[in-house]
Amino acid sequence: MMSFDNCVYANFNFEFNKVIKKVNEKRYSDLIFICIGTNKIVGDSFGPIIGEILKRNVNDRRIKVIGDLINNINAKNIKNIKYNCANPYVISIDSALSDTIEPGNVFIIKKGLVPGSALNKKATAIGNIAIKGIVAKDEKNLIKNYYNLKNVDYKLILKFSKNISKIILQSIKFLNL
């Protein structure tokens, strides 16, 4: 079961605002969100739901969102992404499994994300940083992990994605590209 601790969101808000400050200081040309996952597996829809929400609410041409509920980004098609901008800062967003971190937690890693790793898929790391939402326990077993991803409660994923999207949308108001 996913827990939704306000401390988790407060910590994510603090860390994500530090990311926005860094983007402002380094003067990147664009901010790109790569929202990875599929709407066909509930536990893997964290990224696409966030992508959908961001696309509907971002009105700045320098902020691009790739991946949503219609146009899924996965380990197979991620290599085909073209940025078409000079100096972008890329943030990848994906659901994740963990055997040590409780579902409902979200964290930022300071490197690119390798999509599909929970299901042993091979792909290239993407992004300057990654946002990972823990959606289920990592059983260290491909079949059990697939089962766990398929059986996450959709209402919980939706709530989780909406809360993270809200923080992202509030933070990018302070972006100076």
Image (tube, helix red, strand yellow):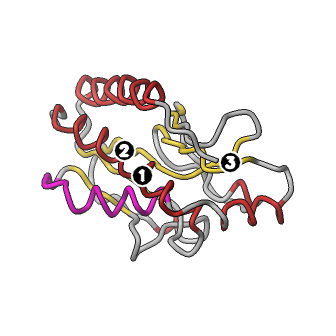
Residue 15, how many percent across, how many down?
40, 25
Disc 2 to disc 1: CB gap under 8 Å: yes
Q: Where, by quadrant of the figure, is residue 99 drawn?
A: top right
Name which residue lies at 23% across and 31% down. 27
- The residue at which mark 3 appears reads as 97
Left or right: residue 143 versus residue 17 is right
- Residue, x 48% and y 41% (percent of image)? 131
Badge 2: residue crowd in 10 Å (few <14, some 14–19, many ≥20): some
Looking at marks 3 and 2 on the same chain, the residue that comes earlier in the sequence is marked by 3
Q: Are marks 3 and 2 in contact (CB under 8 Å)?
A: no
Q: Secondary structure at mark 3?
A: strand
N-terminal of the two: label 3 or label 1?
3
Dot 1, crowdedness within 10 Å: few (<14), some or many (≥20)?
Answer: some
Residue 81, located in which quarter of the rendered image? bottom left
Numbered disc in front, either 3 or 2: 2
- Point out residue 174 in the picture as x, y percentages from the top left corner: 17, 31
Mark 1 secondary-structure assignment: helix
Q: State whether the magenta stretch is mostly helix, strand or loop.
A: helix
Picture coordinates of residue 62, whole percent (x, y): 19, 50
Q: Quadrant of residue 54?
A: bottom left
Q: Can you identify the residue that label 2 sits on?
A: 163
Q: CA distance from mark 2 to mark 1?
A: 6 Å
Magenta segment boundaries in residue numbering? 46-61
Which amino acid type is shown beneath numbered disc 1?
Answer: Lys
In this rendering, would 129 be left or right of 33? right
Residue where numbered disc 1 is placed: 159
Closest to the observer: 118 or 40?
A: 40
Q: Point out the residue furthest to the right here.
A: 141
Q: Give the distance between the C-alpha atoms of the residues marked 3 and 2, in whole angstroms.
A: 19 Å
Callout 3 amino acid: Leu
Looking at the rendered structure, the kind of residue marked 2 is Asn
- Where 121 sits versus 91, above or below? below
